[in-house]
Image (cartoon, rainbow, N blue to C red):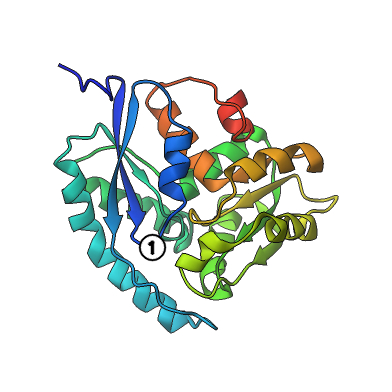
């Protein structure tokens, strides 16, 4: 018998312990019969007034050590599918890095499919038939370089980008809408065909839907695009309004 709430699909969601945005975003975009069950990846809320490549690499090592036990915990709920609610690890080391990362996660989960930010953005941009993009992140350069590399290797030209350089993981969720609007206008331009926002703890889903209209081009909030990938990969075609054009039109 199916789950009485998740009678269509149960999603196991992996999210950083510091992240306070992605979980409510996924609940906000819920559809009947699909449930999201969160398992937290431990992450220390370390302050950052600068960022070195070495510090970024050390965090990645610790994160990788957390992934298997985090997945094992949520597997006890018997999910049908996995959703990665953290975007940076999915962009690391370019396109091949993403494919290798996903293969490891599927090994940990016993072969379950997994929506992830990098792959979801690539799919969305290809459907939108755009090639020149601008990128907004909450990261520092040592992290956003991985994002730019991924998109470049996937066949897109990153013509502009902006790093908000948030001082800690928790501080990402403190970025207000006015600052995001200003950043979007800063990276927009005539050559930009679409804007992509990375960082699942940035409060962007509803603002991206608004920005799509006043900029007159696709603005992809990563949480909405990840959720779109999760739904469509499971043949759930419900249209959602107010969260961007992917969930509305594709």
Left or right: residue 107 versus residue 168 is left
Can you give x and y, in whole percent of width and height, for residue 202 in the image? 54, 56
In percent of the image, x 43 and y 25: which residue is there?
Answer: 31
Can you give x and y, in whole percent of width and height, for residue 206 in the image? 62, 41
Q: Residues within 10 Å of mark 1 (few under 14, many from 20)?
A: some
157 vs 192, nearest the viewer = 192
In percent of the image, x 41 and y 34: which residue is there?
Answer: 230
Residue that label 1 marks: 18
In percent of the image, x 54 and y 21: which residue is there?
Answer: 239
In this orientation, does residue 173 appear? yes
Q: How many marks?
A: 1
Can you give x and y, in whole percent of width and height, for residue 6 in the image? 28, 25
Q: Quadrant of the C terminus?
A: top right
Task: Indicate the quadrant where residue 78 lies.
Answer: top left
Can you give x and y, in whole percent of width and height, for residue 49 in the image? 54, 83
Task: Indicate the quadrant where residue 152 lies.
Answer: bottom right
């Amino acid at each position: 018998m199916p789950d009485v709430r998740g009678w269509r699909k149960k999603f196991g969601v992996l999210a950083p312990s510091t992240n306070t945005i992605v979980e409510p975003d996924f609940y906000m975009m819920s559809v009947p019969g699909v449930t999201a069950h969160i398992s937290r990846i431990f992450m220390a809320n370390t302050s950052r007034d600068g960022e070195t490549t070495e510090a970024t690499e050390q965090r990645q090592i610790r994160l990788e050590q957390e992934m298997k036990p985090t997945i094992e915990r949520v597997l006890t709920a018997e999910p049908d599918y996995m959703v990665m609610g953290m975007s940076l690890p999915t962009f690391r080391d370019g396109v091949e890095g993403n494919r290798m990362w996903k293969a490891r996660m599927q090994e940990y989960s016993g072969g379950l499919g997994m929506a992830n930010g990098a792959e979801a953005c690539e799919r969305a941009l290809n459907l939108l038939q755009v090639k020149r993009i601008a990128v907004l992140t909450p990261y520092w350069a040592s992290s956003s370089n991985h994002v730019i590399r991924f998109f470049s290797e996937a066949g897109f030209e990153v013509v502009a980008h902006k790093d908000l350089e948030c001082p800690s993981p928790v501080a990402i969720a403190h970025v207000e809408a006015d600052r995001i609007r200003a950043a979007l206008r800063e990276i927009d331009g005539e050559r930009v065909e679409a804007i992509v926002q990375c960082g699942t703890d940035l409060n962007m889903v509803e603002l991206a839907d608004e920005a799509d209209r006043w900029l007159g081009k696709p603005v992809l909030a990563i949480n909405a695009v990840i959720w779109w990938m999760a739904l469509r990969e499971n043949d759930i075609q419900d249209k959602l309004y107010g969260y961007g054009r992917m969930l509305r039109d594709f």
